[in-house]
Every structure is written in structure tokens, then in C-alpha cells.
């Protein structure tokens, strides 16, 4: 939905935090994307980039899959 974004224009809160977490774990986006594919989510590099930049809404199931790939939990996003 076009109108579902924060006042700052972000469509998800966790994307930038996921990017920070991924980089802290020295993981490349391409590797995260490949691993997500093995878990059944065929996400494109463009879509994943939009998630990390906050430009795309993020479903709770998608968030949990990304955290699983990163070996992280919701608490790691605080």
C-alpha cells in the first residue's frame, strides 16, 4: 500500500538495522540472498536491497527468515 510509511518515508523499521547486523557479522548480501533461497524465499537482490534500505515493507515471516540466516534474534535488532 502506497500510504503505509513512516513520517521519514521508511516502509519498514528493521531494514537498516538488518543491514548493520549483516555487516557486523561480515556477511555479504548476496550470500544472505542465496541462503534465503535454500529456505524457500526466492528474493531478488533488488528486493533485498529495498528491504535493507527501508523502501519495502517487511513481513514478519520475512524478518524471521533473515534473522535465521544471520544467526540472530529479534533482540539483536534493539
Image (spheres, rainbow, N blue to C red):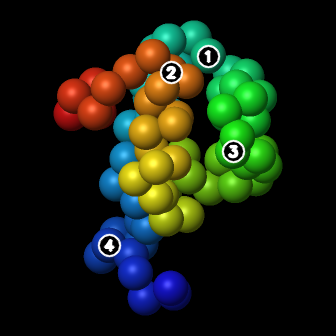
Q: Residue at x 44, y 67 (%)?
A: 11
Q: Residue at the front extreme?
A: 40
Q: In the picture provided, is 27 more to the left or to the right than 30?
A: left
Disc 1 to disc 3, how far (Cα)? Answer: 18 Å
Disc 3 to disc 4, how far (Cα)? Answer: 26 Å
Disc 4 to disc 1, how far (Cα)? Answer: 28 Å
Q: In the picture provided, is 27 more to the left or to the right than 13?
A: right
Query: Dot 1 lies on which element?
Result: loop
Instruction: Name the spot of residue 3 as percent of width and height, x first.
Output: 43, 88
Q: Which residue is mark 3?
A: 41
Instruction: Name the spot of residue 9 as percent of width and height, x first.
Output: 41, 72
Disc 2 to disc 1, how far (Cα)? Answer: 8 Å
Q: Quadrant of residue 34?
A: top right
Question: Taking 27 as reference, is 4 above or below it?
Answer: below
Q: Is residue 13 visible?
A: yes
Q: Residues within 10 Å of mark 1 (few under 14, many from 20)?
A: some
Question: Taking 13 as reference, is 63 above or below it?
Answer: above
Q: Which residue is mark 2?
A: 70
> Who comes first in sequence, dot 2 or dot 1?
1
Which of the two discs, 1 and 3, sits closer to the camera? 3
Amino acid at each position: 500500500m502506497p500510504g503505509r510509511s513512516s513520517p521519514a518515508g521508511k516502509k519498514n523499521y528493521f531494514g537498516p538495522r538488518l543491514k548493520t547486523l549483516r555487516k557486523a557479522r561480515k556477511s555479504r548480501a548476496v550470500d544472505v540472498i542465496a541462503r534465503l533461497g535454500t529456505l524457500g524465499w526466492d528474493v531478488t537482490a533488488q528486493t533485498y536491497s529495498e528491504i535493507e534500505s527501508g523502501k519495502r515493507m517487511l513481513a514478519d515471516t520475512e524478518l524471521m527468515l533473515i534473522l535465521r540466516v544471520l544467526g540472530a534474534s529479534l533482540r539483536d535488532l534493539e
